[in-house]
Amino acid sequence: MTVLVINVGGTRYDKYSLPFIQKICDYNNVKLHVLDKDIPQNTNKAHPSWLKLFCFDLINDDFIILWDLDLVPTKLYKFKDFFDLDKINACYDCSFTQQGFTFNGKFKYNCGLMGIPKKYSNDLKRIYEEQSKQITYPSHEQYHVNDWIFDNKIKVNKLDQNMNSMFNGIESFPDSVLNRHYTWQIRSREHREDLIEKHYEKYYNQL
């Protein structure tokens, strides 16, 4: 098992979020792989978020957890208590759970935290090859991955929603939250940076 984080080009908040992700990887005795530059496979020069679809080209492992840089742990927990190593693992997106949003009728899962077995490597790369040249969907690879799950009736191990609890405009959150995702209802890049810095100051020494 390896955790992959995409950080191509760097951000102003990576210095606050990566220490959290490193700490939970260490707690689970799992390697953290941070991709900080573009790769030759990105022939269509797609947004860095698409590069997670090449995760098994980048990492020699049987199971990879795709982890967004703005998904920040709040406490330590064991991955083995949540992930099924034989299935795709993901949480529902809160726009689906709270607003019933399905984009094209196929969208449910947020791609900011996904566990992927190696058997799906070629499928993920095919999504890039077929969909990233002429992009017609917003949200980078996310809606295309959901199309693939829906169209192919892929069995998904639905993760506890507390593993991908999205920012909802309120800075505080329940104690049950395991990871806070600073992506939904974020007003600006600066707003995200400020929230993640505050998260670091409040929670890092508690881990």
Image (cartoon, grey):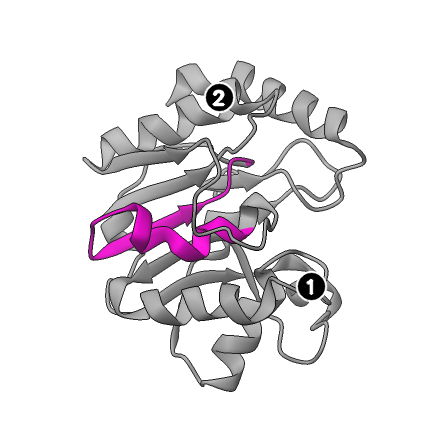
The quadrant where residue 3 appears? top left
Q: Position of residue 155 (x, y in %)?
A: 38, 78
Q: Which residue is mark 2?
A: 203
Question: Between 117 and 16, which is closer to the camera in this rendering?
Answer: 117
Question: Between 23 and 47, which is closer to the camera in this rendering?
Answer: 47
Q: Is residue 39 left or right of residue 144?
A: left
The residue sitting at 37% across, 23% down in the picture is 207
Name which residue type carries label 1: Ile
The quadrant where residue 157 appears? bottom left
Question: Between 129 and 1, which is closer to the camera in this rendering?
Answer: 129
Question: Between 151 and 131, which is closer to the camera in this rendering?
Answer: 131
Q: Position of residue 43 (x, y in %)?
A: 52, 53
Asked if 182 appears above or below 191 in the picture, the reply is below
The quadrant where residue 27 appears? top left
Real-space Cα separation, disc 1 to disc 2, in angstroms: 38 Å
Name which residue type carries label 2: Tyr
Q: Is residue 141 left or right of residue 119?
A: right
Front disc: 1 or 2: 1
- Does the magenta-highlighted stretch encompass residue 52? yes
| Mark sitting on residue 169 | none
The residue sitting at 81% across, 36% down in the picture is 187
Q: Is residue 87 left or right of residue 156?
A: left
Badge 2, how many Cα within 10 Å: few under 14, some, many 20+? some
SS state under label 1 = loop
Q: Which residue is mark 1?
A: 135
Q: Magenta stretch?
A: 50-70
Asked if 18 appears above or below 186 in the picture, the reply is above
Q: Position of residue 48 (x, y in %)?
A: 55, 44
Asked if 34 appears above or below 137 in the picture, the reply is above
The residue sitting at 21% across, 49% down in the picture is 60
The residue sitting at 23% across, 52% down in the picture is 80
